Image (cartoon, rainbow, N blue to C red):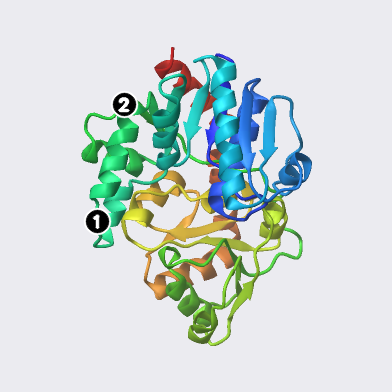
Amino acid sequence: MSARSWFWAYRPTVPSTRAQSVQVVNAAHAMASLGNEVELCVEGAEDARSALSAYGLEPIDGLRLVCLPRGRTWASLAYRARLAAFVARTRGEGVVLARRKRHAAWARRWLGRRFHLLLEAHEVDSALASERGEDPRAALALERTVLREACGVVCNAPGTLRLLRETHPWSPPATVVHNAARRGPGPAADAVGVGVIGSVRPDKDPWTVAEAARRCRHPVTWIGADRDLAELERRSDGRLALEGPVSPAEVPARASRCRTLLVPLSHGLFGDALTSPLKLWDALASGVPIVAADTPAVRAVAEGAALLYRPGDAGSLVSALDRVCEDDALRTALVATARERARTWEQRAVEVAAFADRCLP
C-alpha cells in the first residue's frame, strides 16, 4: 500500500459518545498506524492526548490531531485554514476523506482539484428524505455534486452501496468497508442481565425493548440514556433500568459486566439497509453473547454470530434474551462465531487504503 497524506473532512466534538465521533477518531488513528500522515480537526478537547485517551487511544506518530478553538465561527475558520494548508503542503497528492457531503462540496468549490477526494457514505440522504415525506431535491443535488467530484466512495454497508447505485447510476468507483471495534475481555465472573449500549432513538426499537424488559426473566439495562425517558420506564413497569452514557474507552469494560448484549433496531430504510451499527461491532468484539434485530443489514454481518429477534415483536425478543442468558452451549457457539466476525480498526484502515490505491493515481 502507498503511504499517503490524509485529511479527515469532518470535525467531531471530542470527547463524545456519538457513533460518528467514535468512528472518525478510531479510523484516523488506525490510518496513521499504517505509516500514513493523517490530520484530523476536533472541537471541544483541550489537547490531543486527552482527546485520544477518551477513546482508549495513545498518541501515535503520523496522526496530527488539531484541537480547534472554541466557538462555532472560530472553529469553522480554523478548520478551513487547516484544510487549505494541508492542500498547499501536499501539492495535489493529498487525500481528503469527506465524512460529510457538504464538507466535500465546499472543499472542491473553494480549493478546486488540488487534492484527491474520497467520500465516506453512511447514508443516502435523498432516500431518507423521501422516506420521511420530505422533498429530496436538495439532497439529490448535493449527492450529484459530490459524486461527480469524488474519485471514489467508501460505503458503510452493502445496502448503502446498492441504494447509492440505484439513485446515482453514474457514480464513481465504490466499495463497502464495514466498521470495527476494539477487542473486549468477555463476560466478567459476576456479569448479570442484558445490556443495551448506545443512545435511545426511535430507529433502535425502544418500545419493544421496554415491553420485553417487563417480561424478561433477566434484568435489562439501557446504558447510554441521554435524556428523560419516563415513558420508556413506564412501559416496562420500571423493569428497564436506564444508565447515563459511558465514554468510548469504557465501553468494553461495561459490556463485560453484562451476561448478554442486545443490539436493537427497527425496520425502515436505516435499519434494513443503511446501517452497519458501531455497537454491533462492539458487541461482536466483546466476547459477550449477542441478541440482535433480524434486519437485512444486521443479518449480512451477524447471522450465526447473534441470536436474531423480529423487530417490533416483544415476544420474539423475550424468547431470544432468555435463551441466550440461560443456554450455555448456545452462548459458547455465538461467541466463537462473533470472534471470527470481529474486526479491528487497523484491518478497516487497510481496506480503505487498498481502495485508495485502486482508484487514486
Q: Is residue 63 left or right of residue 201?
A: right
Q: Is residue 238 left or right of residue 294?
A: right
> Residue 265 at what x, y percent from top left?
42, 61
Q: Going 72% across and 49% down the picture, which residue do you hit?
A: 54
Q: Which image quarter is the N terminus in?
A: top right
Residue 283 point in image, percent of width and height: 58, 52
Which residue is located at x 72 percent, y 42 percent?
Answer: 52
Residue that carries the numbered disc 2 in the rendered image: 172
The mark total stands at 2
User: Does dot 2 land on a helix, a strand or a loop?
Assistant: loop
- 114 or 315: nearer the viewer: 114
State the mark number for residue 130: 1
Q: Amino acid at mark 1?
A: Ser
Q: Quadrant of residue 340?
A: top right
User: Label 2: few (<14), some or many (≥20) within 10 Å?
Assistant: some
Separation of marks 1 and 2 at Cα, in angstroms: 23 Å
Residue 273 appears in the picture as rendered: yes
Instruction: Please rate how many residues cluster around mark 1, counting C-alpha atoms within 10 Å: few if below 14, some from 14 to 19, many from 20.
Output: few
Question: Who's the residue at 65% across and 69% down the image?
Answer: 244
